[in-house]
Image (tube, rainbow, N blue to C red):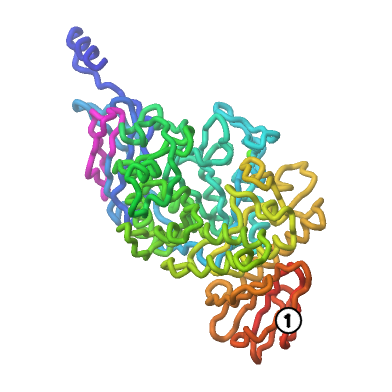
Amino acid sequence: MRTILCTLALLLGMSTPARAIDIERIEPTNWWVGMRHNRVELLVHGTGIATSTPRLSRAGVAIVDVQKTDNPNYLFVTVEIAGDAIPGGIDIEFVDAGKVVATHPWRLDAREPGSARRRGFDARDAIYLVTPDRFANGDPSNDSVTGMLEAANRANPNGRHGGDIAGMRQHIDYIAGMGFTQLWPTPFLENDQPQYSYHGYAITDLYKTDPRMGRNEDVRALSREARAKGVGLIMDIVLNHIGSKHWWMTDLPAKDWINHGGTFAPTNHRRTTIQDPHAAPADREAFTDGWFVDAMPDLNQRNPHLARYLIQNTLWWIEYAGLSGIREDTFGYADTQFLGDWAKAVLAEYPDFAMVGEEWSINPVVVAHWQRGKQNTSGHVPHMPSMMDFPIHIALRSALAQPEGWDSGWVNLYEMLANDFVYPDADALVVFAENHDTSRLFAHLDGDLATWKLGMAYLATVRGTPQFYYGSEVLLRGPRERNDGQLRADMPGGWSGDPADAFTGNGLSAAQRDAQAYTRALFDWRKRTPLLHSGKLTHFAPQDGVYVYFRHDGAKSVMVALNKNAGATPLLLERFDAFLRGRGARDALTGNAVALGTTLALPGKSATLLEIE
Ligand code: CA
């Protein structure tokens, strides 16, 4: 085309006309002055852009590198920003054959004060996990958006139900009032996929909130309003894959952008291959480079431009939305070296920030491999402050569901916790009984409310940061076997016209009100009890269906006695003399004094929670 134009121009005796290029995107659209990461690589996308040269004119800002790929429609332009650059708009010009062929706006912003030293979540916090599409529909006008591939259909368990950012904004008081101090919504970025788009893990634009959830500005408002009420915002980041309808897929930035050449090849899910000294290299490659499903192309983070894009995207969201933490999806499936580089870069920018990774294994040595400070035989140097405690999650569910025996019941939990020595920092792990990918604990226990409460009491008192899944406080149950669409049921009261309302309590059954009150009492107590955040944990071998442990600091302690027996059980206290002799006790939830004699009467199927002084 260009040749034809030139020939035509020559034939007509004219000078060569400057060919205008339509710049479709520059990402990120802005950056901040004063970031440690002050050399930002911009992805520029426009047909034929690679033949042009970018330029800009602004004090304190310079283009220091320009890279091309095998796709002429992309340029990677590195901009260096001086610490004294002035915030404001900048025009970036693209010049070809001496003519400006495109001009695109870009922007420098000022940082929020204290941004770099923000505190991430830790064991002082309790996390409330929400599937936004299923939590509350605060704005029915955005349920379906013209031009997007999937419209709302609340009758379809696997469809979009209309929940959104506005819904979360309307219920921050409820979340805070339940004793939670962090909100983790599953991904809210654009998922313009033809089906299953509600879950959010098939992202089609990494810089854009899904219009059916709201706008980027709404996320920022949610974060600001939540923070004002003592609730931090944790963002669910997906480094491993994108959605098949991501705009990259119609014009890949480079041939090696997507693993397996951009065509579906499934992962083998064999996560042990990362450390296994005997693993066949082909199996390890199949684990990290295979795709989850054909709707989720697997990213090749070994491409340095993609690696920088993903790192910058994370920094951008932390800075833009004022995040207090990140939960990183399908952690080990991404390139191992990249995972270290990514976490290191985030913590270099925000040293007190928190990030938790998902490594779905029952084996603590598989999980510990990724935690900061772990000396790995594999040679991998990890940087993640926290990981999801899947081993305890699995052991807890077994402990609660199994009958007591020498090698069943509480001993699962007792022995799993004993593995804490493999972690550099077990107190930083995130503990949970269920999440958006499991069955709910209440279903797992066949609706046994008393045993469910034992599980909640454990979560609120064990070491680490507890994570709770929305709706379980009003006994959302779902099927016993994993079924995502039904597990992620609508929160009662999140939609106008709902017959019951978890937020006000109207229409809830007695059992639902009981469970909600218990959850609120537990997490409110936990919130104001430093021993449960940082106290050392000492546990005693389970006996006769009772598991006892203490959180203590040398002066005071909290005693937790979990009785799984159906009937009342007398607990001989002599074993616990070191913590109890000569001390007074009161019930942590009622405040009533409790006499400590030679035995303590534990009610059947209940947690006895005592503050010892
Ligand atoms: Ca909506």
Q: Residue at x 47, y 57 (%)?
A: 356
Q: Quadrant of residue 52?
A: top left
Front residue of 161/9: it is 161
Measured from the top left, where is residue 372 in percent x and y?
38, 63
Q: In which quadrant will I find the N terminus?
A: top left
Q: What SS does tag 1 mark? A: strand
- Res. 540 image quadrant: bottom right
Tell me what residue is drawn at x 59 percent, y 52 percent: 435
Magenta region: 49-76
* Residue 223 belongs to magenta span: no
Q: Nearer the viewer, residue 610 or 9?
A: 610
Residue 494: percent from left, percent from top: 70, 46
Q: Amino acid at mark 1?
A: Leu
The quadrant in which the C terminus is found is bottom right
Question: In the picture shown, does residue 160 fall above or below 414?
Answer: above
Residue 365 place in picture, x, y as percent:
43, 60
Q: State the residue position of label 1.
A: 600
Q: Is residue 50 magenta?
A: yes
Please state if 27 lies on the left or on the right of 471 as rendered: left
